[in-house]
């Protein structure tokens, strides 16, 4: 029984060291992956078998300690190092890195309930952005970047009608999209003339955050404006030049999400994270304190939903245009861990080898 226990202990040690080596291998494989957060392994002891319990002693004899046998080890945690890493210049206009804490929010064009539950969206530190053929700001995997867009806002921020003049930034969390281009009406130089390609800003949407243009009196061409000289500021503000009219267009702001426990985020594929159980509450802001003090969903002070939880925070992060966050993998550390885990694995194989030899001797007693 004791020998089989030693064998099981060695096997559990081998499995734990192999799992740890898998984490090291993943870290090394992602040494050049932008925005990658390396994992760190911790071990824990496995269950113990108590051969005899301890005692406090009595009037005649002293106390004794419990007699227990361990059964190896297992992986306790694989922790992610969510600290900010070095920034690498790329020279690409659409690349942007987060300097400080926070995550970009990305998802599909329509995600039911994103306005009321931003945790449905994916989080990322990988800011390789560009506008696609339909005018949506997307990352390199085609997911839509969420934020706050310039809208035709009136009536206390509750209007829903698109218009020519972007009067304010809506605080509804929506997919970032370029304004639509007007189809053009009237005669140049005459009252009411609207030049073809003029930016038509969306109204404040009331559905699930789709950044739609339903309704409104201004006819559009169903295509977005031709954007040139696109720039992203340190506060996440996106601006461009309307290639048809030459007007400056403020598209909106990139939103950043923060959670109480970044290490509790659930790691998904393609450098994405999900704010599931373990990460705590989520707060939303813009970089460099832009839009700080405003409430989500265009709530005004005194409204029922104008709560601290719905207030856009100051945010301590800034965006660095033309940069991407480098991988957090430290090759020197990983190679050192690789040697440690390899030797640990090798030592545990020796336990199995010695146990096998002892069992062989036991069987040979009969000979």
Image (tube, grey):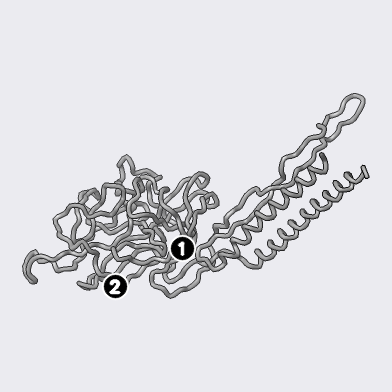
Foreground: 228 or 346? 346
Residue at 81% x, 39% y: name it: 1
What percent of the width, then of the height, locates residue 123? 45, 55
What percent of the width, then of the height, locates residue 35? 50, 63
Foreground: 176 or 19? 19
In the image, residue 363 sits, relative to residue 232, either above or below, namely above
What percent of the width, then of the height, locates residue 282? 45, 48
Q: Does residue 140 appear to the left or right of 45 in the view shown?
A: left
Which residue is the site of mark 2? 228
Name the mark on residue 361: none
Q: Does residue 252 appear to the left or right of 285 in the view shown?
A: left
Secondary structure beneath dot 2 equals strand
Residue at 72% x, 53% y: name it: 14
Which residue is the site of mark 1? 126
Crowdedness near tag 1: few (<14), some (14–19) or many (≥20) residues, C-alpha within 10 Å: many
Residue at 24% x, 48% y: name it: 158
Foreground: 159 or 133? 133
Instruction: Tell me which numbered mark, 2 or 1, is placed earlier along the sequence.
Output: 1
């Amino acid at each position: 029984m004791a020998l089989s226990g030693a064998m099981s202990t060695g096997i559990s040690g081998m499995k734990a060291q192999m799992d740890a080596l898998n984490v090291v291998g993943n870290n090394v494989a992602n040494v050049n992956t932008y925005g990658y957060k390396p994992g760190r392994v911790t071990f824990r002891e496995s269950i113990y078998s108590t051969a005899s319990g301890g005692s406090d002693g009595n009037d005649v004899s002293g106390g004794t300690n419990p007699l227990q046998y361990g059964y190896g080890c297992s992986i306790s945690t694989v922790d992610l190092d969510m600290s900010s890493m070095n920034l690498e210049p790329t020279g690409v206009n659409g690349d942007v890195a987060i300097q400080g804490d926070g995550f970009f929010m990305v998802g599909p064009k329509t995600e039911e309930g994103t306005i009321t539950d931003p945790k449905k969206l994916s989080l990322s530190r990988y800011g390789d952005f560009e506008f696609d053929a339909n005018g949506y700001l997307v990352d390199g995997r085609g997911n839509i970047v969420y934020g706050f867009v310039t809208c035709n806002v009136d009536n206390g921020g509750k209007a829903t009608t698109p218009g020519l003049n972007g009067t304010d930034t809506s605080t509804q969390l929506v997919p970032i999209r370029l304004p639509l281009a007007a189809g053009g009406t009237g005669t140049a130089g005459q009252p009411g003339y609207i030049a073809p390609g003029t930016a038509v800003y969306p109204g404040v949407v009331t559905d699930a955050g789709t950044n739609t243009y339903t309704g409104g009196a201004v006819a559009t061409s169903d295509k977005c404006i031709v954007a040139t000289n696109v720039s992203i500021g340190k506060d996440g503000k996106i601006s461009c030049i309307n290639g048809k009219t030459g007007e400056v267009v403020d598209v909106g702001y990139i939103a950043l999400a923060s959670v109480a426990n970044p290490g509790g985020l659930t790691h998904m594929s393609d450098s994405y994270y999900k704010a599931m159980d373990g990460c705590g509450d989520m707060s939303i802001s813009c970089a460099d304190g832009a839009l700080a003090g405003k409430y989500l969903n265009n709530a005004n002070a005194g409204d029922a939903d104008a709560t601290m939880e719905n207030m856009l925070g100051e945010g301590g992060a800034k965006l660095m245009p033309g940069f991407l966050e480098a991988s957090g993998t430290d090759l020197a550390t990983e190679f050192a861990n690789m040697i440690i885990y390899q030797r640990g694995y090798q030592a545990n194989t020796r336990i199995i080898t010695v146990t096998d030899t002892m069992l062989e001797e036991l069987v040979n007693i009969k000979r």
